[in-house]
Image: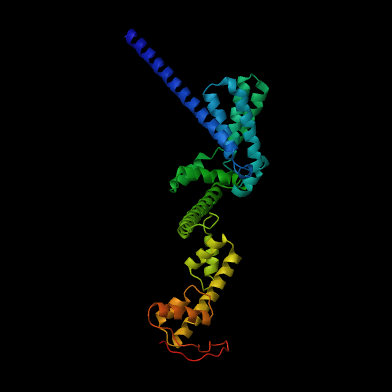
Amino acid sequence: GEMSESTARKEREKQKAKDLKQAKESFEMSVQLLLIAEDSLKKVNPKFLEGIDNDARLKIDLAWALFKAERIEDLPKAEDALEEAEAKCERVFGKDFERAKRVRGSFCAEKALLVRTLLLRGAAAVVKRESDEATRLLERCASLCSEFDVDLELVSSLMMMGFDERDARRAVRAICSTEAGRFNTRDGQVQSCLEFLNWMETETQLAAEREIVRRGRERRARRLGRTRGGALVDVDLVDRLMCLGTYTEKQAAKALKETTNDFNRALDLLQAEASRAATREQLEATMVSIGFTPEAARLAVRDSDRSIDQVYERMSALQASSGAGAPGAGLPELPGTGAATAGVQPG
């Protein structure tokens, strides 16, 4: 029996060592991938990174992976990454997260980034045997962690009303993190949490609706095509042109493609095309009135800004080439021009 227990213990230790080795290898791979991601992120235009925390999150993950891979020689790199992450959080969210608080209230989940940063910096200080610095960092981390504590009894009350634990915890943190929430009565806290949850549900629905609209706009933009510059047609400008009441979606999109989403130039283009279309329609009606067939008249004035004389010459040439003979000389007066012409019938 003792032999069997000893063998089993050795097997467990062997398996544990194997698992630790595999975990270390996995973290080594994570380090390499995160370093590649860090290099790629450096190629991004800095102005696109000013208002987001992606690079801060990446640096925190890189520091964590270096610790888990036990790469003590890279401890200075991990510390630099953590300091940069903390500085970036302050730039993005404001000092003491004041910018995030204005949006989310007194409690904001983004503080978890700072908690992770302080915890890892504290661990680095422990490794370097800097006890005073480690104590300072970890105490600050513990203070922030206390803000994530929730009243479990209040959470349980909300869950009994049908809310899931995640939403219940979020509501309790949001309400009880305020001074009014902390010192309110229990019934008042429950009511405030319910109001927050109803508001959150409404906001979620609105966000979902906005996402549906956004995706619909993207599909519509792809359907309408791209401008000469390669950008998608601006669907807002298409709608503005259509609201004028005289242009179709196809016409508006075509004009914006030609002008690279320049609204004023597109409108000028559409107005010029409308003027040409009116001229062609007037010429066609005039040619029909002097005896040419509607089909021949449309053919003569199609895609044309010609005068009545030029159109007549084209029709004469078309009739001659078809063997029908040319109409007689002289043209009727074009309405509104005062040009005197003689009535002619096709020969």
Q: What residue lies at 52% left-to-right and 44% top-to-bottom?
A: 170
| Numbered-mark total | 0
Asked whether 68 or 100 is in front, the reply is 68
Q: What residue lies at 64% left-to-right and 44% top-to-bottom?
A: 47
The image quadrant of residue 149 is top right
Relative vertical location of residue 130 with respect to residue 87 in this rendering, above or below: above
Image spot of residue 238 (x, y percent): 52, 64
Asked whether 118 or 275 is in front, the reply is 275
Along the horizontal axis of the image, is 237 left or right of 140?
Answer: left
Relative vertical location of residue 311 with respect to residue 172 in this rendering, above or below: below
Q: What residue lies at 47% left-to-right and 56% top-to-bottom?
A: 222
Along the horizontal axis of the image, is 101 left or right of 318?
Answer: right
Q: Which of the image's four quarters has the N terminus?
A: top left
- Residue 112 showing in the rendered view: no
Image spot of residue 121 (x, y percent): 62, 27
Q: What residue lies at 46% left-to-right and 59% top-to-bottom?
A: 220
Image spot of residue 189 (x, y percent): 55, 48
Colour style of the rendered protein structure: rainbow
Q: Which of the image's four quarters has the C terminus?
A: bottom left
- Residue 283 showing in the rendered view: yes
Image spot of residue 67 (x, y percent): 55, 24
User: In the image as oriented, which residue stretches furthest toward the top?
Assistant: 3
